[in-house]
Amino acid sequence: MLLGSGGRENALAWSLSRSACIDELVAAPGNPGIAELAEIVACDIEDPTGVAGLVRRARFDLVVVGPEAPLVAGVADAVRDAGVPVFGPSRAAARIEGSKSYAKALMERAQIPTAAWRTFADPDEATAYLDEIGPPYVIKADGLAAGKGVVVTAERDEAVRAVKERLVEHRFGAAGASIVIEEFLDGEEASLIAFSDGSHVVACEPAQDYKRALDGDAGPNTGGMGSYSPVPACPPALVEQIVREVIEPLVRQTAAEDAPFVGALYAGLALTSKGPKVIEFNARFGDPETQALLPRLRSDLGEVALAAATGSFGPDTKLEWSPDPCVTVVLASGGYPGPHQTGHEISGLNAASVLEKVVVFHSGTRREGDRVVTSGGRVLAVSAMGDSFAAARARAYRAAGMIEFEGKHLRGDIARRAEQNEGSL
Ligand code: AMP
Ligand code: GLY
């Protein structure tokens, strides 16, 4: 059983439906893309008791949790208590994502390289600290804010406004009751996701996410406007260093503190001149990184997830990847991440989906009769493979261009730098 309803879960469903060890895939609450791959059941996925009851009654053999909210609510604990293997961390382990100040303190205890930081609940103290450290400023809501709680700016006015919005106007509710202000990290970003069985880890290949809404990394932060994998700026030796200095220490530390991490551990990294430093940890797969990773995965996702959920990684557990790159372009509603309209009919889905080496994942869509309409900020993620970044990009953008809905917005520069650097790989 797969929990979730976004593009990441559509990609997980796509991979799980190809697994040789899965006969039947059920998803809740799913979306129209997932419904083509799994049986949909209705269920409040943030209610631990309800999910555990359903899982027990239906005798599911494995539960895979996609998004963070059920994890932070304790759904994995309830399913595990019901005696069913679950791919996803306990509520205690999910705090690495649910609370930025908890994650920072944990990184300090495990000596994991990350930006210097302080946490504040008082707006005047926060503003005084901004003036102490100077620009560029990085201000984050402490709790979960769907990737939108972070402001990075060189402008003092904007930084002070960000503090006020969180600590005075409570724009992010409880998630912004306290904030973290941290050192600005320079350098290219990469996301490294690793499977953990609680004590052993197996890393995926790296991916890169595009957080800003507009081309050239302009505009506000979003949940992610596109991605690609692998990452030329993060070659295998650097991946090994990140596993050694970031992933393994985190898994060791959580295990030592009685909150072993089982599931997908996501490290968002800045590749600085002083080595990789953690920007954030997430307790789940990335969205849209997963949409660019899973089309490249040659190993059986069901097998790996079950082995992780049952603590049975061996020394030989490895992941096999296609050497071909994958490029993912997100189609968003006009105005996202701000206010946006929904309910617009989507055309061209079938024509785009049948293109060779293209998969179209649904993020924010809804079925209305025989039409599929937009229902969220990020609507679709179009992934394409190719034997080069140039080929994968061309395919992804061709497919993205075949799909239309009112207000459609996409970035035109996803993986452009990877394509330009291709000659030097
Ligand atoms: P987060 O939600 O913590 O991942 O932050 C969202 C985005 O803000 C990151 O992907 C970065 O692009 C940017 N960001 C966050 N923290 C920093 C930092 N310390 N230095 C520079 N950029 C950052
Ligand atoms: N793409 C960033 C995230 O999933 O948090």
Image (spheres, helix red, strand yellow):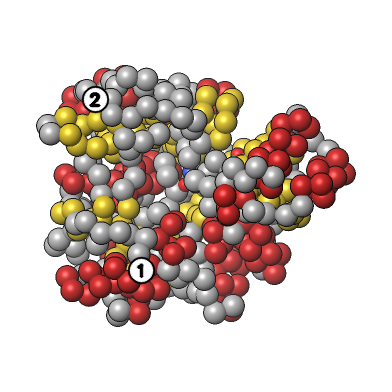
Q: Using residue 362 as the reference point, say whether residue 70 is left or right of it.
A: right
Q: Quick one: label 1 or label 2, which is nearer the N terminus? A: 1
Could you tell me the amino acid type at mark 1?
Pro
Determine the residue located farthest toward the front in the rendered image: 169
- Label 1 close to label 2 by CB (< 8 Å): no
Q: Which circle marks residue 8 in the picture?
A: none
In the rendered image, the vertical position of residue 77 relative to residue 135, given as above or below: below
Q: Is residue 360 visible?
A: yes
In the rendered image, the vertical position of residue 335 relative to residue 376, given as above or below: above
| Mark 2 residue crowding within 10 angstroms, few (<14) / some (14–19) / many (20+) | some
Residue at image location 66% in from the left, 59% down from the top: 101
Q: Quadrant of ligand 1?
A: top right
Determine the residue located farthest toward the right in the rendered image: 132
Q: Using residue 162 as the reference point, say whether residue 366 is left or right of it.
A: left
Residue wearing tag 1: 48
In the rendered image, the vertical position of residue 276 relative to residue 83, given as above or below: above
Residue at image location 19% in from the left, 36% down from the top: 367
Could you tell me the amino acid type at mark 2?
Glu
Q: Is residue 280 visible?
A: no
Residue at image location 25% in from the left, 30% down from the top: 373
Q: Secondary structure at mark 1?
A: helix
Mark 1 within 8 Å of ligand 2, using the beta carbon: no
> Where's the N terminus, which quadrant?
bottom left
Q: Picture coordinates of residue 75 (x, y %)?
A: 38, 67
Residue wearing tag 2: 345
Q: Using residue 6 as the reference point, say whether residue 116 is left or right of it.
A: right
Q: Picture coordinates of residue 228 (x, y %)?
A: 44, 37
